[in-house]
Amino acid sequence: MLTPEELPRIQSALSEVDLDGWLLFDFHGINPVTVGMLQLEGMVTRRVFVYVPRRGMPTAITHAIEQGPWRRWPEAWGRVVYSGWRELESALATLVRGHRIAMEYSPGDAVPYVDRVPAGVIEMVRQAGAVVVTSGELVSQFFAGFDAGNTAAHVRAAEAIRTIALDAFVMVGERTRRDEAFTEYAVQSWILERFARAGLEHGHAPIVAIGPNAAEPHYSPTADYTSAVRPGDVLLIDLWAREPDQPFADQTWMGVLGAPDTTTVKVWEAVRDARDAAISVLRARVAAAVAVRGAEVDAAARGVIESRGYGRYFTHRTGHSIDPREIHGSGPHLDDFETREERSLIPGVAFSIEPGIYIPNTLGVRSEVNGLMREREVVITPTDFQTELLVVGG
């Protein structure tokens, strides 16, 4: 958040990368970075700019009819009030002309989670005489990172989710042994009831999918579209939740209702070993105080799956950012497949680690844990994560 207390850290970061400033822009909430950094309260329907210079005080450009949301803006900081577009563009040019500035922009849309400012606004800023570069690293440092409270809440949520997932497999095993008829949707509903009892928010409902359905990575059952769960099925449960207004935890667990066949075991071992290869790269680099990029971690996991002959079935990135607000956040991702993620995994950022293999109409297997970057340490949640297929109902 942009506050007087945080301003010196932001300005120090701008100096380190030789930027003259960071220009925040929003219109109707299209840029979550600006929304989160400013946390304005009240109706904001016009274009907003805030320029944070390397030296000196920030300046906001605000519309005349929407001054209420700025009542907490520090008096020592600048505020320019405009009504018409000519005033807006003139004020903008006065602030940025001749400067090299960062915005939520990603050349070639290399990282869509950073590419938030419309092309027309980028054109306006360049025509005003500024050089625009990506704010990706600033977003990681000042928007996407966890504080101590976020970290503690994430760890608690992760352990609660682990318990619920394992209990779900126990429930599935018991119902299978009793030869009860039940569906993926019934299991999903059971998990949602446990979330409610634990006081956890979840957003979209969890994924509960038997083997062929799990081959569609974002499959999710509904009351009208669900499959029966039967003995012999491979079962994927992907569940995510959070304490109110805190970061999400996100996990995927795999089980089999009876003894697994050879193919299922081979696919599971490839996915598990890919996940563990990603964790090993993170731990080794962090322990040695060597920078590591999300793309490098993606390559480590993908290399394992490719070496086992399943590369064409690993159809998504290894992991997504988890920032304090969103489960698919704006920080660095573990990705050199879907996007060109070049940002470093700096202390404070968090992400999922979730390689998968998806054989169409046959089988889908994924294993997911979360990583939190700390100084000289990467914390993996949950603490006790899955190492073998869960065999239930036999």
Image (cartoon, rainbow, N blue to C red):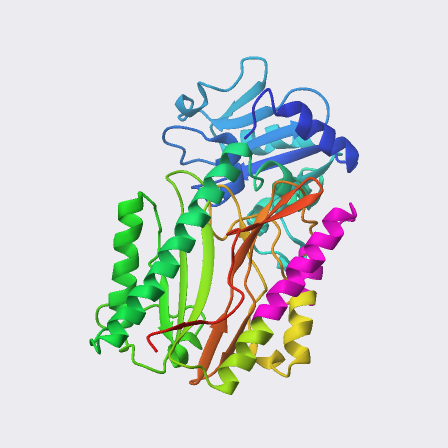
**Residue placed most toward the observer, 182 or 86:** 182
Q: Residue at x 24, y 67 (%)?
A: 186
Span highlighted in magenta in the image? 272-299
Q: Main secondary structure of the magenta part?
A: helix
Give percent across and percent down for residue 300.
Answer: 69, 66
Q: Quadrant of the C terminus?
A: bottom left
Q: Quadrant of the N terminus?
A: top right
Determine which quarter of the picture holds residue 128: top right
Q: Residue at x 50, y 52 (%)?
A: 382
**Residue 317 can be seen, yes or no:** yes
Give percent across and percent down for residue 357.
Answer: 53, 76
**Residue placed most toward the observer, 392 or 190:** 392
Q: Is residue 33 magenta?
A: no
Give percent across and percent down for residue 296.
Answer: 71, 60
Q: Is residue 275 magenta?
A: yes
- From the viewer's perspective, tell me whether residue 366 is left or right of residue 7: left
